[in-house]
Amino acid sequence: MDSPFLDRFSTTGGKPIFLHFLNRELHDAVGKRVHDALYLQTVRSCTVLHNEPMFANISQQIETADIHSALMSELILLSKQPIFLPYSDFDRIEEFLQSRRALYQHDRNRYPIYFDHAAIRACGELTPIKQDTGNTTKYISDSVKKWSHSQPNDVERLITKLDSFSLRALSEQIGSICARSEGRAMTYATFRETELGKTINPQEEGALRRALSGLYVNHYVKNFRALTILGLPSIEYFDTKHNEPMLCNSTIEFIMRFTGLHSYLNKSSSYAVNERIEYYDSTEKMELHYATKRLSVAIRQLNSGGPLRKINWETMNKVVRIMLDAAGRLPEQSRRATSYPEALKNAAQRINGMCNMIKREEEGVRSALSKSDSAIGRLLIATATDTEDKIALNVLNRHEISVVDVDFNGRSSIRYFGIHRGVEVFHVRSSSGSGGPSGAQEVVGEAIDRIRPNFIISAGICAGLVPSKQKIGDIAVSTALRDYEAQRVGSGGFFDRLLGRETIIPRGPRPDAGPLLLDRARHCYSQWGGAKVHFGIFLSGDKLVDSQKFRKAVLKIEPEAVALEMEGAGISAVAARQLKEWIIVKGICDFAASKTKDHQEIAAENAFAFLTGMIKAGGLSAVPYGNM
């Protein structure tokens, strides 16, 4: 389909970028939530590295990006320039909203924004650009009907064999519903209200949702000859293969950090947008754009041995990680950029340097790419006190693991330390304890959403539980964890009731530490020459314990426990939910009685020295299966 709507904005001969991730149906299809902060970062990064326009249906913009969110504000500002194009079949927002109310009358609870007067008024800032996209609803409906009659169609090409197998027995019902639903939006709601919706099982429902969402994305990709951004967490199901490595989300992120441009995304939204708009078509920006194009070609040729083979986002990611791991051989910038144009120019030079290195060492890099251990892991270190924070930075810095960048694009700042022995190192700070808006569970959970680590290490200070075998400054490493707050308190048996004694019975799981992290900790210990290390069960709860009596009481819950701390319960819970490996490495600063701060620094010093030993020993590049 010819598209003067997009062709008039393409100054580089490239393809437009379809922001498919704004479609909330994609997220529902895989049962995951929208990552607002990640998508804002992705949009901002694309405005720096690319000159092709980004576009999306205005309904996607309204339904997914909350009307008052930073993402919505960013898209509105970009839409006033030829950078983001919110297209529609209508040239007035009022006409569009009226059509949506008619289309979603049957599903108004799911799309309240079209029926809320305050939200409708807020939409007045949006200016749709009229473009005939073809009838998306008709395309999806016709494709499904053809599939139900075993005619040539796009459905089988877009869904997995397992999803196809799940839906095949329902093909007649699905085709019949499509035939009866002319004029209605072709979403899962169309099927949910029928008899099929009452009998369909979860696997079949997911398969149908994914088929409908895949068709939706395919319609716009085909009609606009567009590309999509690959490797976005949760919705990788909808990734398509193409030969544009610089549109892999992880690759974009790595390049932004590698070139020093990432810091320009951390400024206030309006300032960052205005600066990027001002220099969008500048000479410096075009030099960077062509450098990224050159890198795309170099990666494509490196991976395939030729320019025609298409590669997927995992391989693109792998190539760039190998290159970044070897980036120490590139000449450093002579001085830090003092302005955005200078940063663009420096970034182009660094990327061209990487291209030259790929060409010069092509065989060596291709050989590294073929090895199974060439992946790079991500480690998130979590601390919870000022002392832990200070000592962590001091110890890591002494071992040449220094802060490269700080990400302020969320409620918690995340420090980035670069790549060391095959693992990217990050750090986040929470308040003490697991609960609350700034507690470890909330802060680490947000950090997992933003940086997607493979490993999480809660590090710092703790209380020892066995004074006869432990001493101040010893290190405790978790093999498992018990949340002592989760318990049943009762009167117990006959004699307990007779004597008025309470019986405490622990409840809930006792999760094991990550097996790979525990193995790496034991490997580090085998070469360790520092403070004594105690491996064992940790007790965790939100209480700051300064009572020998209480220490003895909780020790009865887990008599073999070696340490008591406050953040592990929340971190282990969120890590388990996100399928991430976790472990606790903390130094003993007291024995939960007669507390002082006298020994906190030496305890933290020993713990972070051991953690640094784990990083330096290597082995954290071995990303666990399913932990991506």
Image (cartoon, helix red, strand yellow):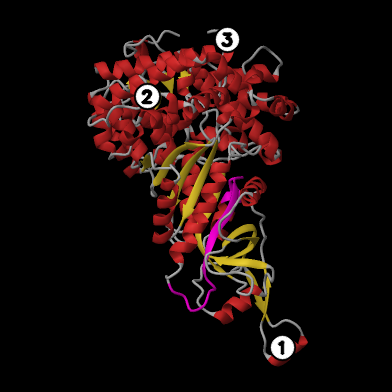
As for residue 491 lying within the magenta part, the answer is no
Q: Is residue 369 visible?
A: yes
- Does residue 282 sit above or below 520 in this rendering? above
Q: Position of residue 248 (x, y in %)?
A: 49, 25
What's drawn in magenta, residue-wise?
575-596
Q: Is residue 201 left or right of residue 419?
A: right
Mark carried by residue 497 = 1
Q: Position of residue 204 (x, y in %)?
A: 69, 34
Of circles 2 and 1, the one toward us is: 2
**CA neighbours of label 2 inside 10 A, class few (<14), some (14 to 19), many (20+):** few
Tell me where residue 87 sits by quadrant: top left
Residue tagged 3: 305
Q: Give amino acid for label 3.
A: Gly
CA distance separating discs 1 and 3? 78 Å
Query: Along the polypeptide, which appears first: circle 1 or circle 3?
Result: 3
Q: Position of residue 183 (x, y in %)?
A: 51, 25
Query: Along the polypeptide, which appears first: circle 2 or circle 1?
Result: 2
CA distance separating discs 3 and 2? 27 Å
Q: Quadrant of the C terminus?
A: top right
- Does residue 421 sit above or below 444 in this rendering? above
**Mark 3–mark 2 CB contact (< 8 Å):** no
